[in-house]
Image (cartoon, rainbow, N blue to C red):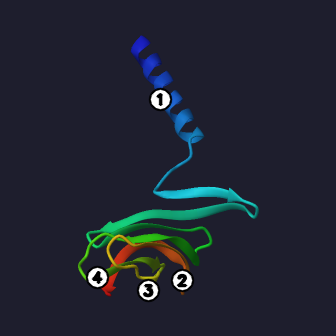
Amino acid sequence: MKKRLVATALASAAIALATALPASAGTTGTTGEEGSQNCISRSVSRSEGHGWAQTCDGRNFNGWIQDDKADGRCPYVIAYHHGGGESHGPRVGPKGKRIDFNSYAGGNISDFGIGYQTC
């Protein structure tokens, strides 16, 4: 009987705690002047370079990108669109160069990645 009461109390406490904490699935929710916004923020990397990008309105995205390898390849951030398609941020190179950017996507952004092109 005592074990059942302890188990019930622990289950109730876990449910109360779970409903009180915000969910987190890799996106960041922020509150701005316009009210609550759902932002997507990601670090991206591959051997050619690394960076970071975010969007809060689903169309405009900003961040930074850095070239990490002297290989003739210039990395860039990819903004993937809901339902297919993608938009690219600016390319960066040579090795060691880092740039900040602000870009506009041609579709609603669902996630970010990184790509490269020959410089």
Residue shown at 46%/82% (left/top)? 90
Q: Position of residue 34 (x, y in %)?
A: 75, 64
Q: Residues within 10 Å of mark 1 (few under 14, many from 20)?
A: few
Which amino acid type corresponds to the residue marked 1 in the rendered image? Ala
Which amino acid type corresponds to the residue marked 4 in the rendered image? Arg
Q: Marks 2 and 1: CB-CB under 8 Å? A: no
Residue shown at 41%/82% (left/top)? 91
Find disc 4 in the rendering and name its residue.
73
Among numbered discs 4 and 3, the one appearing first in the sequence: 4
Q: Nearer the viewer, mark 3 or mark 2?
A: 2
Count of numbered circles on the image: 4
Horizontally, is 41 left or right of 3 in the view? right
Find disc 1 in the rendering and name its residue.
11
Instruction: Name the foreground residue: 84 vs 39.
Output: 39
Q: Marks 1 and 4: CB-CB under 8 Å? A: no
Instruction: Name the foreground residue: 56 vs 49.
Output: 49
Task: Tell me the CA gap for discs 1 and 3.
Answer: 45 Å
- Residue 74, quarter of picture: bottom left
| Element on which disc 2 rests | loop
Task: Tell me the CA gap for discs 2 and 4.
Answer: 23 Å
The label shown at residue 85 is 3
Q: Position of residue 11 (x, y in %)?
A: 47, 29
Seen in the picture, residue 115 relative to 3 is either above or below; the reply is below
Which amino acid type corresponds to the residue marked 3 in the rendered image? Gly
Q: Position of residue 46 (x, y in %)?
A: 29, 69
Task: Tell me the CA gap for discs 3 and 2.
Answer: 10 Å
Find disc 2 in the rendering and name its residue.
105
Horizontally, is 37 left or right of 89 in the view? right
- Quarter of the C terminus within the rendering: bottom left
Instruction: Name the foreground residue: 83 vs 117.
Output: 117
Q: Residues within 10 Å of mark 3 (few under 14, many from 20)?
A: few
